Image: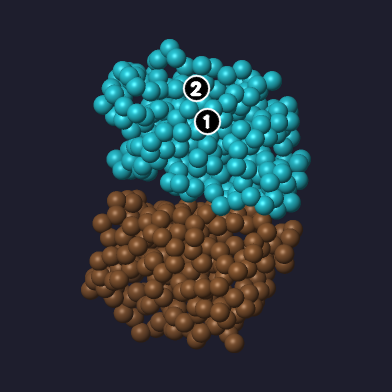
Chain colours: A brown, B cyan
Amino acid sequence: MCELLGIASSIATDFDFSFTFKGFSMRGGQTGPHADGWGVSLYEGPFARTFLEPRPAYGSALARFLRDNPIHASLVVAHVRKMTMGQAAIENTHPFLRVFHHRHISFAHNGTLPNIHKIPLAYESTVGTTDSEHTFCVMLEKLHKAYPHEYPKDPLELGRRLFDIANQLGEDGVLNFLFADGEYLYARCGDNLSLITRKAPFGEATLVDTDVTVHLADMLDPEQRVVVVATEPVTREAEWQKASPGTLWVIGHGELLETFRN
Amino acid sequence: MCELLGIASSIATDFDFSFTFKGFSMRGGQTGPHADGWGVSLYEGPFARTFLEPRPAYGSALARFLRDNPIHASLVVAHVRKMTMGQAAIENTHPFLRVFHHRHISFAHNGTLPNIHKIPLAYESTVGTTDSEHTFCVMLEKLHKAYPHEYPKDPLELGRRLFDIANQLGEDGVLNFLFADGEYLYARCGDNLSLITRKAPFGEATLVDTDVTVHLADMLDPEQRVVVVATEPVTREAEWQKASPGTLWVIGHGELLETFRN
């Protein structure tokens, strides 16, 4: 099992990343069983600054650097990896990144698609050996075919298409993923994904792993809205909603825009 | 003007990066006029860990982190950018990265190709607005056409092809570049590029900018060979050779393997 974490905020910020990621990264080897690598993509406009390590986040100098030098972002995709397929190497570490119509697409996967390698690739190719990266490449080629000239302007149209592609590919395995494009976050539940929306008044939030209480109101702008998606709830709040298998959420600017479900 | 720095070593190491990059990064805002951004790709096998910042390297927490936490690599592409085209934004910062046949290609450019945007792209696309990234995409599409199914096995064949492509594109501007694929470094001189090969006995090397003397023999393995390519020589040694315009060097495993010139 791996863990996915996505954050989409209405305002670029470094609050929630350092907060949520702190709890999340501690599961990367210390309080959880997720010990083979971690990575995070932080969007600055269409560009995803991406930091990856094929080692536990706990005790990592790079994870510490990111905590001490927070990067302003409104869209974040993070992943902590427990190796299921492929070796614990940097090229097998999520999120994976490709350029598609003038923006970085960042993709992190939780689950296994054991037969995905049977689908051949024409233009895209993998650097590592995971089923996850191959899945991402298959998805990108399908999107290139559907949108050969420009990026789809309507996020709900793209959401519907990703929902269909994921239903098709996900039939033969487990496909939880986060797919981000710099503006929107598409989150798909194969078997395990939860979401929470936060807005003022924020009150307190308690990290599940660490018993640390964080006063969100001190960190967030009163106008700010934030959606957090994670494999498991990363705080103890009751408002987390769990997706049913097959669900695809379209999230943008701190709001859940659409839910596609079977 | 920007500065290019490439290092190809016969053994993965962190010596020469921290050494050479130290002098190099100090030109990123302190002792030189290159102040708009910097980036470095460090190869671990076919994967290029890439760190970019649209701010001067001098005083950068990320550059300091890389100095304090050196990453083991045998192939390095670095760039310090003085903005000529495009804004000082992360998406315009070199090196640019794409996946081509199961490896990262890392590309850094020095010079300007003012009309390159007139060449349309079919599959590749830019994230930023530089002529450099567009040039890289044009080159990749030409390579995809020449090698649709797999990466060319012979680095000299690829070198010859890059030499031809560069001659063609470089006619209309200035095209100095570094193109790395995880194993080989292809370095092209438009108007300004120098190279040095180092092997035992190493003796001393003096950084041009800082008067720091480094005892290379303390850092390098006696069996190690290293090639350093840079816009301007980064040490005071006499052995630097300057390329004539149009030259393309093929470098691998610490050796200059081939020189293509007009």
Up-down relation of residue B8 to residue A89 (above or below): above
Position of residue A92 measured from the top left corner of the image (x, y, whole percent) = 45, 59
Q: Nearer the viewer, mark 2 or mark 1?
A: 1
Kind of element beneath mark 2: strand
Q: Quadrant for the C terminus of chain A, please.
A: bottom right
Q: Chain of mark 1?
A: B
Up-down relation of residue B119 to residue A135 (above or below): above
Q: Amino acid at mark 1?
A: Ile
Position of residue B62 measured from the top left corner of the image (x, y, whole percent) = 37, 43
Position of residue B192 measured from the top left corner of the image (x, y, whole percent) = 57, 21
Q: Are marks 2 and 1 in contact (CB under 8 Å)?
A: yes
Q: Is residue B78 left or right of residue B174?
A: left
Which residue is at the front of the view, A31 or A222? A31
Q: Which mark is residue B87?
A: none
Q: Is residue A11 left or right of residue B168?
A: left
Q: Chain of mark 2?
A: B
Q: Which mark is residue B195?
A: 2
Q: Residue at x 43, y 12 (%)?
A: B238
Q: Residue at x 40, y 56 (%)?
A: A89
Mark 1, residue position: B251
Which residue is at the front of the view, A261 or B254? B254
Up-down relation of residue A165 to residue B166 (above or below): below
**Mark closest to the chain's N terminus, 2 or 1:** 2
Labels 2 and 1 within one chain: yes
Q: Residue at x 44, y 63 (%)?
A: A86
Tell me the CA gap for discs 2 and 1.
Answer: 10 Å
Report the number of numbered marks.
2
Where on the picture, by quarter, is residue A121?
bottom right
Q: Amino acid at mark 2?
A: Leu
Q: Quadrant for the N terminus of chain A, please.
A: bottom left
Q: Residue at x 74, y 51 (%)?
A: B122
